[in-house]
Amino acid sequence: MYINKAFELVKWTEGQTGMNPTVGCVIVKDDRIVGIGAHLTEGEAHAEVNAIHMAGTHAQGATLYCTLEPCSHHGKTPPCTEKIVAAGISKVVYAASDVTLSSGVSYMQSKGIEVEKVEDDAIAAFYAPFFTSKTSSLPYVTIKMATTIDGKTADDESISKWITNDKSRAHAHQVRYGMDAIMVGYNTYKKDTPTLDARLYKDKRIKKVIVTNGPFVLNTQDDNDYDRSRLIIVSAIDQHIDGITVIHVPRLSPEDILKALYNERIRNLLIEGGMQTIRTFIEAKCYNEIHHYIAPKLLGGTSKHQFLTTDTLSSMRDMTHFNLVSVNQFDDDVLLIYRKA
Amino acid sequence: MYINKAFELVKWTEGQTGMNPTVGCVIVKDDRIVGIGAHLTEGEAHAEVNAIHMAGTHAQGATLYCTLEPCSHHGKTPPCTEKIVAAGISKVVYAASDVTLSSGVSYMQSKGIEVEKVEDDAIAAFYAPFFTSKTSSLPYVTIKMATTIDGKTADDESISKWITNDKSRAHAHQVRYGMDAIMVGYNTYKKDTPTLDARLYKDKRIKKVIVTNGPFVLNTQDDNDYDRSRLIIVSAIDQHIDGITVIHVPRLSPEDILKALYNERIRNLLIEGGMQTIRTFIEAKCYNEIHHYIAPKLLGGTSKHQFLTTDTLSSMRDMTHFNLVSVNQFDDDVLLIYRKA
């Protein structure tokens, strides 16, 4: 129960801690909450430390609930485990193991603290992208598709607005909010001039990544300092644009693009289109998840805007297998979330 | 609670009452079940009558729960409402209204019986195909598709076994069991030699409908009296095959096919393939539901086995809209059931 409260704090602060994952912490003594903490800003205090400060002397003999295993390493801040020991916490309950840093569990146990790991699928799923990205030194890549029942992203006249319903689109904006960057191909940028923000959450300053083969020309909508600072142009040719980050990736191979974006501190990337960009990343198997929104409509017609045809012939022998992570229903729309198996 | 027990009986007997819907009935007196009935065989006693017989004198002053509104017409059996009145039932609770026959409600009320209609979505959904078919004098048509995430029914080498998992296929067999007939095109019949039965439920004798443009040649698997009696050949040419029902439908228009099958007492039809047959029925808008099984796999490749391309160009202006009836999960497979809006 308390671990769920800690996870609630994680959801409140998602997207505001840069390269760090968000973490929530609740300290409980005699069935009363005596401390609440979250990691709020990269480089500043961790969740456990904030909660211990709030608890003050009540931390003595209390139980600390934390969504992520407390760290024991000297990073931008001192190790949380030392603070936990110093505060006199008697028991630590956590959900997700930190697989990238030295474990704090054995240190705390050596100091007489009881440590318990609880299994929580939702919390494990929340941290999976973070650990995957950190382990691979590549962004965790989510591909978003919105199609009809028969997999069309647009009709044969290339009209695509609006296939999915309001609730689906609102959810898509929520998903954007958890991202460090949203990528589209240059054609999509010029044609749809997408804002690629999380609508109600503009303060997040999600980066807008545009992949281009040739010269980049800014859309007027992005012609101000705020929007220029959000843009990252991944370009096959070497070019300079005032006030805009341009990364030169000669052959635009998906893997090289991802490496370059990781160096730009992007660990959570959403690819929204167009189909050619998505096709390139899928063919190179450079992605982790697919978010497939399906609207209750049947278009038929040609396979011009079909998710998904590729240049190579398909074969059962080398198709990609997935795990179905979740099924969400938005009135008559469905969102299926798949993770590569 | 009792209405759910009555609905349980409906599910037990689904598929064994020919052109009639299955109906369940429970009679309750002083919180004890005093009668249980179901309609078991077309032309024989209705559920209410069976339950009243079982209740005997206990029916006096009891409450009768019935999934479908009791009939008041003289059909193959006398009206149930007269039996209900004669038995001394004091209250009738039912879920689905009978929109095709004269209502029994006013008659029962005139005899001093309290009548209550309860709203139950599952029961309403169960009877929808029956009433739709009866009103239109056409079979209720369900199209079944099993595809990858990207809508492929087979790879570019035309290999399709097995896209979906065991649980999905077991469910598909359950769905078959509720059908009067399963239809495939002649090419699919020759190539896959599908058994088109409900596997564990062979006694159901579901009809096997094969649509053909030219001469029909029996697969050896069907070369016995039992299987011949299950076959209905819908043929564009006039032909005779020993022991097999052949319907001559000159241009094979989907609507004419459906009319002919309704005359063959088929009110619940499942179309399983191949893609050309499905395409023809979808283009003619001659169907009611789509059952879309989605396996967690991505094939890519060409649109050769794509659900769904058609010969006419697609346009947002005349696409078909659906209601999402249900979302079912079978491990990593999903089944989305859509009904035309």
Image: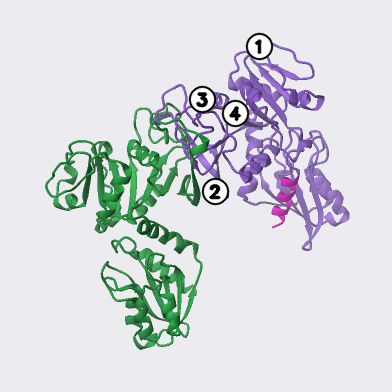
Chain colours: A purple, B green
Residue B71 picture quarter: bottom left
- First reached walking from the N terminus: tag 4 or tag 1: 1
Q: Of B277 and A30, which appears nearest the observer? A: B277
Based on the picture, tell me whether residue A10 belongs to the magenta stretch: yes
Q: Is residue A341 visible?
A: no
Which residue matches tag 1? A237
Q: Is residue A262 visible?
A: yes
- First reached walking from the N terminus: tag 2 or tag 3: 3
Residues indicated by labels 2 and 1 sit on the same polypeptide chain = yes
Identify the amino acid type marked 1.
Answer: Ile
Q: Of B7 and A324, which appears nearest the observer? A: B7
Quick one: SS at disc 4?
Answer: strand
- Are dots 2 and 1 in contact, CB under 8 Å? no
| CA distance for labels 2 and 3 | 31 Å
Q: Residue at x 40, y 28 (%)?
A: A315
| CA distance for labels 1 and 3 | 22 Å
B179 horizontally vs A118: left or right:
left
Q: Residues within 10 Å of mark 2 (few under 14, many from 20)?
A: some
Which residue matches tag 3? A283
Residue A273: image tag: 4
Q: Residues within 10 Å of mark 4 (few under 14, many from 20)?
A: many
Identify the amino acid type marked 4.
Answer: Gly
Quick one: SS at disc 2?
Answer: loop
| CA distance for labels 2 and 4 | 23 Å
Quick one: SS at disc 1?
Answer: loop
